[in-house]
């Protein structure tokens, strides 16, 4: 069987299982006795083995098989979990990840047998499972086989296909097919209880079946199966020229299929009358499944229990990110053309036709909703990237010989998929940085009166139109003087400059290329290719990074990222005779301020507003606008907020709120922080998007 | 033996006029030629970038070839065109005084220009071709779009 088409599913699922194993083994390290954890590990390892086997990745299969044996021993309480075993298991997971990475690149698992790992695994079995080292490991495979052995006595598995209601049309098709020598078979396919993606498995079964013939009926309906609205089995009627056993074999070849039973459907209308009294075909197939007349339901109690114990799984569809990108682009186009329709309506038709305007308004609300929905589809929790960090911190802790713990909150915070994909590396780097440079050695910590275990915090939360991710540690903090000395040493700054530098400016030095304060180069936080890369990556995502530190108490890196990258609600303003867009998310209020209210503090213009002293930023000056300014008694001020800081942006005129599509301006325009992009207005003109963040 | 012919390679260039000189741009770089349109100024951009335009829904930067080559700016007139170049997948426009026509030049007739090495002056011209009695300076697009200025 050609399995290459399942490669993507295989890779995705393997990664999921591996992530799950990583998490669970971490749990196991904390609580070696937890049976739930052990069972979960066992299940994940077992599925992984099955999948690797199906795809023909023998080395991967062997390694997971041996891991599974060890888990089996743990589950039977013949082997105790200890730290060396945990290390070994993590080693195995790393090896498996390598296999998967290799497969992803070349569709081949490579030639690394990972002998030492396999040997070590077998050593555990031999040394500790004193009774029968070779016998025990078999216990799981045997279980598998037991299940298979049950198969011939089909009484154990209800032949639910017999319950399928065959309608007139189908009966007709069956009869006609019989005339051509094509047989109709009924099949019931049982999926393993542990299977997580039943719909995907069912899909593969259907694919396999369609190679042999045509599926004419399925219970539950194909739609319900796709939506995972079924227990662990489904039944189909297939028309095929192949013999029954061949079809069953093809079905079983799909991984995580527990079993498949079937028989021939005799092409007589009699069948129909026999089945008509069964009330199941339409709609709520799930409930009506067990108590069907005539057919024994030996599994009923079991499956009922299952239904209760099964976690609530969201019904999901996997979609290629590229398809979403296409969708997003189409929505962008739609919004641009809607904007031009709006501007045409405003000028030419000019409110004379109220029905037309009503439709335009309706169109606006539809496109806004459409855009929001597409955005939501693209949002994924950052969980998928931060999940690997506990394991990483644990490894770092061992490697560096420092005690430390990672505390994470807000893993469920959602961000655009593309941002989530990109943010992993910078976060990893910051965590490593904290672990390596931040957290002190145990003795040092005790001497300072801190607890001997260092803490690293990763907090994520949404703040308006931004998502904030904080990496905080309670370590040494940044030694600003040391940074300055290093800067002088490196020739980045002069002594005089260092003297005059504020703390913040000194910290900014850390983000310059080739600046590392670590006294020794370690393989943990690298050779100074660190923070500058972090910074440029975050800026590439239109985000920013801020550092706060207190010597001896720790430091905090705060990353601020825009929620979406493509379409934003913006406020359009006139400055001089140019139009600019400012993200509405940053604007707190819009004020009309008499010019006479401007005060001067240290030579800078400020206004006093509801108890706050707010510095003014005149966009005319910032944007180098030449044209003459009218002398108006009042000015329009946008109060923008970033974190806990406020600023008043002075503009000439407000145009209004608008949904805009952000377009990149390409690399030639230079890297002014002031302008974060451009957008196309309804009349086809280009307006620039002002990054108010950079002004505050 | 008579049927041996020497195959001479030809390259197509778009002939443009800047001030009173003729220049050629290899046609492989050219995506489109459009009339002057509203250009949105970009603050803080290099002085030779006039701004950005909307080309079929994409925002692309526009250079002034005059400013880039150290020529004086003149008032916009009807002959002005924006040549849209495609370089390494990015579109970029350059404003030229006038677009003439497409010319075919034999590759082996294009001569290296006289250029003083290490003079510190960037060289935007890779060669000089002959079209009848006229000379056409072939522009080095990558140099023109670099940050160097004359």
Image (cartoon, coloured by chain):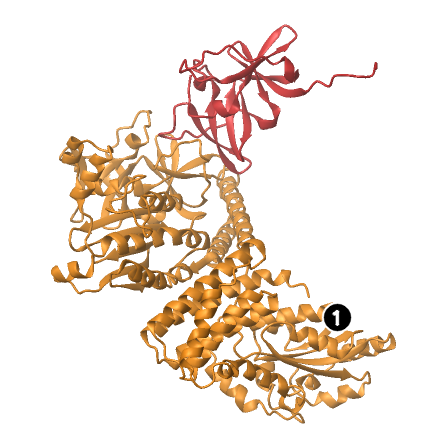
Chain colours: A orange, B red
Nearest the viewer among A270 and A21 is A21
Residue A447: x percent and y percent?
12, 60
**Does residue A545 sit above or below B122 in this rendering?**
below
Q: Is residue A210 shown left or right of residue A441?
A: right
User: Relative to B11, is A639 above or below?
Assistant: below
Relative image position of residue A137 (x, y in whole percent):
50, 80
* Position of the C terminus of chain A by quadrant: top left
Number of numbered discs present?
A: 1
User: Which residue of the protein is positioned furthest toward the top in this rendering?
Assistant: B133
> Residue A322 at what x, y percent from top left?
55, 52
The residue at the far right in this view is A179
Return the chain for callout 1: A
The reply to whether residue A197 is visible in this rendering is no
Q: Nearer the viewer, residue A416 or A62?
A: A62
x, y percent for residue A373: 48, 58
* Front position in the image: A431 or A583: A431
The residue indicated by pointer 1 is A212
Write the residue at 28% across / 30% down. A621
To which quarter of the image does residue A424 belong? bottom left
Q: Residues within 10 Å of mark 1 (few under 14, many from 20)?
A: some
């Amino acid at each position: 069987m050609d399995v290459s088409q399942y490669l993507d599913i295989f890779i995705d699922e393997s990664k999921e299982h591996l992530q799950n194993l990583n998490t669970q083994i971490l749990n196991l390290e904390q609580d070696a006795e937890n049976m739930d954890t052990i069972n979960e590990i066992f299940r994940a390892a077992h599925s992984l083995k099955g999948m690797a086997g199906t795809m023909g990745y023998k080395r991967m299969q062997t390694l997971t098989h041996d891991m599974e044996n060890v888990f089996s021993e743990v589950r039977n309480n013949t082997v105790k979990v200890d730290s060396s075993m945990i290390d070994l298991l993590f080693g195995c997971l790393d090896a498996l990840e390598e296999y998967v990475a290799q497969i992803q690149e070349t569709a081949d698992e490579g030639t690394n047998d990972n002998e030492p790992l396999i040997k070590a695994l077998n050593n555990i079995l031999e040394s500790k499972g004193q009774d029968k080292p070779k016998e025990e490991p078999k216990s799981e495979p045997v279980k598998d086989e037991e299940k298979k052995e049950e198969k011939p006595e089909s009484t154990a598995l209800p032949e639910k296909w017999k319950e399928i209601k065959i309608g007139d049309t189908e009966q007709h098709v069956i009869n006609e097919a019989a005339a051509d020598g094509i047989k109709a078979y009924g099949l019931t396919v049982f999926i393993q209880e542990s299977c997580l993606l039943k719909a995907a498995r069912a899909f593969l079964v259907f694919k396999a079946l369609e190679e042999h013939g045509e599926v004419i009926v399925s219970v539950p309906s194909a739609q319900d199966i796709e939506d995972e609205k079924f227990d662990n089995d489904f039944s189909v009627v297939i028309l095929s020229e192949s013999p029954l056993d061949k079809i069953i074999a093809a079905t079983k070849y799909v991984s995580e299929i527990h079993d498949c039973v079937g028989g021939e459907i005799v092409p007589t209308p009699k069948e129909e009358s026999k089945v008509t009294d069964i009330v199941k075909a339409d709609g709520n197939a799930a409930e009506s499944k067990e108590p069907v007349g005539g057919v024994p339901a030996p599994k009923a109690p079991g499956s009922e229990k299952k239904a209760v114990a099964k976690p609530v799984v969201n019904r999901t569809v996997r979609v290629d990110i590229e398809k979403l990108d296409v969708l997003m682009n189409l929505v962008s186009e739609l919004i641009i053309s809607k904007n031009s329709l709006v501007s045409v309506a405003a000028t030419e038709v000019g409110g004379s036709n109220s029905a037309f305007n009503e439709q335009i308004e309706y169109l606006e609300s539809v496109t806004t909703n459409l855009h929001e929905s597409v955005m939501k589809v693209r949002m994924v929790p950052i969980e998928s990237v931060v999940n690997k960090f506990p394991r990483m911190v644990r490894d770092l802790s061992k490697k560096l010989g420092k005690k430390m713990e990672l505390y994470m909150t807000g893993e469920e915070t959602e961000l655009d998929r593309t941002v989530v994909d990109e943010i992993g590396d910078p976060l990893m780097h910051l965590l490593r940085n904290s672990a390596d440079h931040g957290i002190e050695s145990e003795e040092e910590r005790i001497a300072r009166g801190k607890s001997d275990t260092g803490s690293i915090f990763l907090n994520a939360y949404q703040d308006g139109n931004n998502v904030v991710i904080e990496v905080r540690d309670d370590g040494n903090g940044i030694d600003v003087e040391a940074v300055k000395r290093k800067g002088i040493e490196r020739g980045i700054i002069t002594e005089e400059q260092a003297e005059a530098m504020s703390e913040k400016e000194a910290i900014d030095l850390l983000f310059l290329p080739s600046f590392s304060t670590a006294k020794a180069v370690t393989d943990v936080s690298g050779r100074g290719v660190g923070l500058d890369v972090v910074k440029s990556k975050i800026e590439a995502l239109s985000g920013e990074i801020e550092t706060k530190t207190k010597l001896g108490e720790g430091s905090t890196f705060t990353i601020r990222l825009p929620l979406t990258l493509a379409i934003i609600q913006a406020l359009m303003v006139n400055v001089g005779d140019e139009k600019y867009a400012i993200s509405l998310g940053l604007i707190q209020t819009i004020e009309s301020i008499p010019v006479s209210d401007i005060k001067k503090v240290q030579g800078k213009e400020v206004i006093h507003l509801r108890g706050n002293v707010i510095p003014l930023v005149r966009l005319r000056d910032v944007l180098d606008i030449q044209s003459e300014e009218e002398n108006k008694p009042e000015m329009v001020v946008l109060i923008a907020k970033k974190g806990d800081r406020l600023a008043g942006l002075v503009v000439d005129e407000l145009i209004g709120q608008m949904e805009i599509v952000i377009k990149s301006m390409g690399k030639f325009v230079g890297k002014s922080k002031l302008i974060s992009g451009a957008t196309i207005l309804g009349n086809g003109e280009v307006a620039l998007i002002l990054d108010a963040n950079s002004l505050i | 033996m008579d049927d041996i012919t020497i195959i001479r390679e030809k390259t197509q260039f778009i002939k443009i006029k800047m001030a009173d000189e003729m220049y050629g741009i290899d046609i492989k770089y050219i995506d489109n030629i459009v009339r002057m349109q509203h250009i949105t100024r970009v603050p803080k951009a290099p002085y030779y970038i006039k701004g950005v335009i909307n080309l079929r829904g994409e925002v692309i930067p526009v250079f002034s070839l005059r400013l880039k080559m150290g020529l004086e700016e003149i008032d916009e007139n009807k002959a002005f065109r924006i040549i849209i170049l495609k370089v390494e997948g990015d579109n970029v426009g350059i404003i030229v005084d006038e677009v003439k026509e497409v010319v075919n030049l034999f590759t082996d007739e294009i001569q290296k220009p006289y250029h003083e090495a290490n003079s510190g002056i960037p060289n935007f011209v890779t060669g000089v071709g002959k079209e009848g009695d006229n000379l056409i300076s072939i522009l080095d697009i990558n140099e023109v779009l670099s940050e160097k200025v004359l």
